[in-house]
């Protein structure tokens, strides 16, 4: 590749909306839609990689992350491809959260200024006393004020509101439901073994993904007039609806699919977010192979229905988040987050990932106080 070709590629990449180069290796990144998750994984998801979401027991929180991922794509004007056999993919589009605009941010700021309290007192009410000396950084404050919805990297969303229909471009969204996945492509009459799969659904899904990526000009070798990103969401992969009907315990097709799909993603301007069923977590061997074939792997443990739900130690959280693997594209070592002890909580308006902070344990001090009044104490006891 000549210097002119490399310069033209860098120029085309810099004009793609909703992307930014990594400060570590200049790898092109897109946002997951959750700023806290972007920070944990190293700034965002690299182009051509796979994000693996290991679902919790009920699968609610993994679906929430997928909604953020798709909502960010709608605001950034990316193309979307959604595949699911558990429910109609259109349902995710109708449930996308609303993006927080600059107007909403300005109104909240004006409400503070209109308060009779001084600015210093208002700031003290906003944050805890132990964080007063820390630098306050608001990503929304760095956004451009010229537009209502910014096309910059990363946005904030409100789960209590639905996304504005004007931001959802149906021409950029392609859905694959159960009937679409089971239907063969073209004139292929259910050839179940051309790619080594026992289940034809994996073959059909790969072929339809290839067709959409090729028709949209997302391959690296393609030269479209304007380069864009394809966001691929596959929900509930590995559930009972995906496993081969011939042998429910056979997960070989799932591993083969990840192997083929990863090679496909490496040659495209696309990023995939795949959630796998909690049924697979019972088989450590399969999960280890799938995690190795993915680029970024995250597992979630929900407190719902467990003893941790009533444990006062975890009263401020709804579950734990485990970082199983981080992407190491064009670098010798992956990003190292500040802490691997992470927890998440679902607030009324947003989904937040934080570093797990446990309350202090005063058990030892209590034991010492009790010992002072025991028989070994020098204090005289009155009978």
Image (tube, helix red, strand yellow):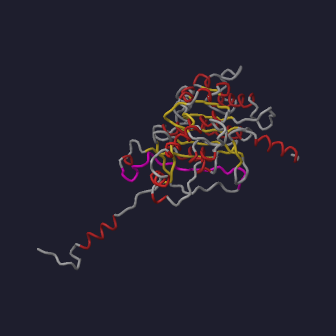
Q: Is residue 373 left or right of residue 179?
A: left
- Please count the marks in the image: 0
Residue visible at 71% across and 45% down?
A: 28
Residue 297 position, x and y percent, is 59, 46
Furthest residue in direction bottom, as rendered: 378
Relative height, residue 307 to residue 359 (above, below): above
- Residue closest to the eye, 124 or 271: 124
Residue visible at 70% across and 36% down?
A: 229
Residue 110 position, x and y percent, is 52, 43
- Residue closest to the eye, 92 or 157: 157
Residue 335 position, x and y percent, is 64, 54
Q: Is residue 319 magenta?
A: yes
Q: Is residue 269 left or right of residue 365?
A: right
Furthest residue in direction front, as rendered: 116
For the C terminus, give its image quadrant: bottom left
Q: Is residue 251 visible?
A: no
Q: Is residue 328 visible?
A: yes
Relative height, residue 272 to residue 180 (above, below): below
- Residue closest to the eye, 1 or 151: 151
What segment carries the magenta color? 311-331
Furthest residue in direction left, as rendered: 383
Relative height, residue 200 to residue 124 (above, below): above
- Asked where in the image residue 370 lies, by quadrant, the reply is bottom left
Q: Is residue 37 magenta?
A: no
């Amino acid at each position: 590749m000549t210097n002119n070709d490399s310069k033209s590629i860098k120029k085309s990449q810099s004009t793609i909306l909703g992307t930014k180069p990594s400060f570590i290796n200049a790898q092109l990144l897109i946002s997951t839609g959750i700023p806290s998750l972007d920070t944990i994984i190293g700034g965002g998801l690299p182009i051509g990689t796979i994000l693996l979401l290991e679902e919790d027991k009920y699968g609610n929180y993994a679906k929430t992350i997928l909604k953020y991922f798709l909502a960010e794509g709608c605001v950034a004007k990316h193309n979307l491809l959604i595949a699911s056999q558990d429910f109609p993919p259109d349902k995710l589009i109708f449930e996308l959260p609303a993006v927080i605009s600059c107007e909403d941010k300005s109104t909240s700021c004006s409400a503070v200024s209109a308060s009779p309290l001084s600015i210093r007192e208002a700031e003290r009410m906003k944050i805890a006393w132990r964080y007063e000396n820390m630098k306050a950084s608001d990503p929304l404050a760095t956004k451009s004020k010229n537009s209502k919805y910014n096309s910059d990297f990363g946005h904030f969303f409100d789960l209590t509101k639905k996304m504005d229909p004007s931001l959802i471009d149906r021409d950029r969204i392609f859905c694959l439901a159960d009937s679409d996945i089971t239907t063969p492509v073209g004139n292929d009459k259910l050839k179940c073994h051309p790619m080594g799969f026992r289940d034809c659904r994996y073959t059909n899904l790969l072929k339809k993904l290839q067709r959409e990526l090729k028709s949209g000009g997302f391959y690296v070798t393609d030269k479209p007039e304007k380069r864009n990103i394809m966001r691929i969401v596959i929900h509930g992969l590995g559930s009972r609806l995906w496993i081969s009907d011939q042998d429910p315990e056979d997960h070989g097709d799932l591993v083969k699919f990840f192997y083929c799909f990863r090679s496909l993603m490496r040659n495209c301007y696309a990023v995939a977010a795949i959630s796998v069923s909690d049924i697979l977590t019972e088989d450590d061997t399969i999960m280890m192979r799938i995690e190795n074939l993915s680029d970024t792997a995250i597992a979630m443990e929900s407190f719902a229905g467990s003893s941790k739900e009533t444990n006062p130690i975890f009263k401020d959280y709804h579950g734990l988040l485990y970082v199983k693997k981080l992407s190491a594209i064009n670098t010798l070592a992956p990003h190292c987050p500040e802490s691997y002890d992470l927890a998440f909580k679902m607030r009324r308006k947003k989904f937040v990932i934080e570093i797990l902070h446990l309350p202090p344990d005063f058990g030892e001090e209590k034991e010492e106080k009790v010992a002072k009044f025991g028989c070994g104490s020098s204090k005289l006891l009155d009978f």
